[in-house]
Image (cartoon, rainbow, N blue to C red):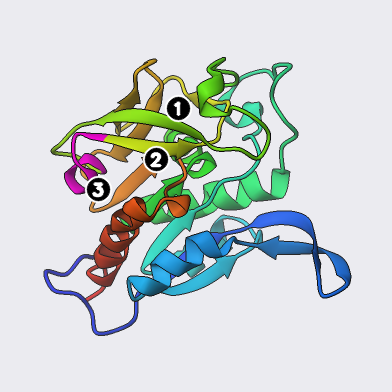
């Protein structure tokens, strides 16, 4: 349910997490983590971030979604092609089964109740897969991933009356790091942004309150803090 006015409760934003071997203070351990780049704009917008490592199936996801006000899906490894009915191609990286299962369960539960959703890079691709869409496993456009651990700068055209164009305007330059992209659209998925090469750079679910996916990395660009603010505002209006 959405409200005309924001709730007085601090919006609870669930964030999916990277599963990595990490080092800190002399320790080297397996960790569930999220870069501060994601947390800081949420905190600045007045949200309470809650980390969501892989933790269960559909029932657990539905229970958790009932407590959250918004869901943010961060980047990460390639989605397992079997999730969208395709055979694995040579350029597809190793998948993380637990992340795929958990994040798709969260997404489906969130879509069911129209929970505000913000998908970043892999998160946008999962949003399309959750609706029955497919992915291109290699787009062959080095500008989107110029070198390991290096963002490319890509100009994106946006539909001005849809998210994210209604927030950012009709043209923006973004930080990209991806070699895969949306192919066939899922049910009720609308393309709202394109690169000059025709790569889908943003999408929105038809009729949703706020269900946005962007192929780029807004967390590393201060201008894109507006998207986090709009997302948190939508989360604040979610519950009466």
Q: N-terminal of the two: label 2 or label 3? A: 3
Q: Secondary structure at mark 3?
A: loop
- The residue at which mark 2 appears reads as 214
Q: Could you say which disc has been placed on residue 208 in the image? A: 3
Q: Of circles 1 and 2, which is in front?
A: 2
Q: Please state, as top left, top right, bottom left or bottom right, where the C terminus lies in the image.
A: bottom left
CA distance separating discs 1 and 2: 15 Å
Q: x and y percent of residue 32 in the render? A: 70, 63
Q: Is residue 148 left or right of residue 14?
A: right
- Image quadrant holding the N terminus, namely bottom left
Q: Residue 119: tell me if it is visible.
A: yes
Residue 51 horizontal side relative to residue 1, left or right: right
Q: Is residue 25 left or right of residue 166?
A: right
- The magenta segment is 164-171
Instruction: Give the answer, above or below, for where 196 lies relative to 27.
Output: above
For the residues labelled 2 and 3, the Cα–Cα distance comes to 15 Å
77, 85: nearer the viewer: 77
Q: Which marked residue is nearer to the observer: mark 2 or mark 3?
A: 2
Residue that mark 1 sits on: 133
Per the model, the C-alpha gap separating discs 3 and 1 is 17 Å
Residue at 56%, 50% (x, y): give it: 103
């Amino acid at each position: 349910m959405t409200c005309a006015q924001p709730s007085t409760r601090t919006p609870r934003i669930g964030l999916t997490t990277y599963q990595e071997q990490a080092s800190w203070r002399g320790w080297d351990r397996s960790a569930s983590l999220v870069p501060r780049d994601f947390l800081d704009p949420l905190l600045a917008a007045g949200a309470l971030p809650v980390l969501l490592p892989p933790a269960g199936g559909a029932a657990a996801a539905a229970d958790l979604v009932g407590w959250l006000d918004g869901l943010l899906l961060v980047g990460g490894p390639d989605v397992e092609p079997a999730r969208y009915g395709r055979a694995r191609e040579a350029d597809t990286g190793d998948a993380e089964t637990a992340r795929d299962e958990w994040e798709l369960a969260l997404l489906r539960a969130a879509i069911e109740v129209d929970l505000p959703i913000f998908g970043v890079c892999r998160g946008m691709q999962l949003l399309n897969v959750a609706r029955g869409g497919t992915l291109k496993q290699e787009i062959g456009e080095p500008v989107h991933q110029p070198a390991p651990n290096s963002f490319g700068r890509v100009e994106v055209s946006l539909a001005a009356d849809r998210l994210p164009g209604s927030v950012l305007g009709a043209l923006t330059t973004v930080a990209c790091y991806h070699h895969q992209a949306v192919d066939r659209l899922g049910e009720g998925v609308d393309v709202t942004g394109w690169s000059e090469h025709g790569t889908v750079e943003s999408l929105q679910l038809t009729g949703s309150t706020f269900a946005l996916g962007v192929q780029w990395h807004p967390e590393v660009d201060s201008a894109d803090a507006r998207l986090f603010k709009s997302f948190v505002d939508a989360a604040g209006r979610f519950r009466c």
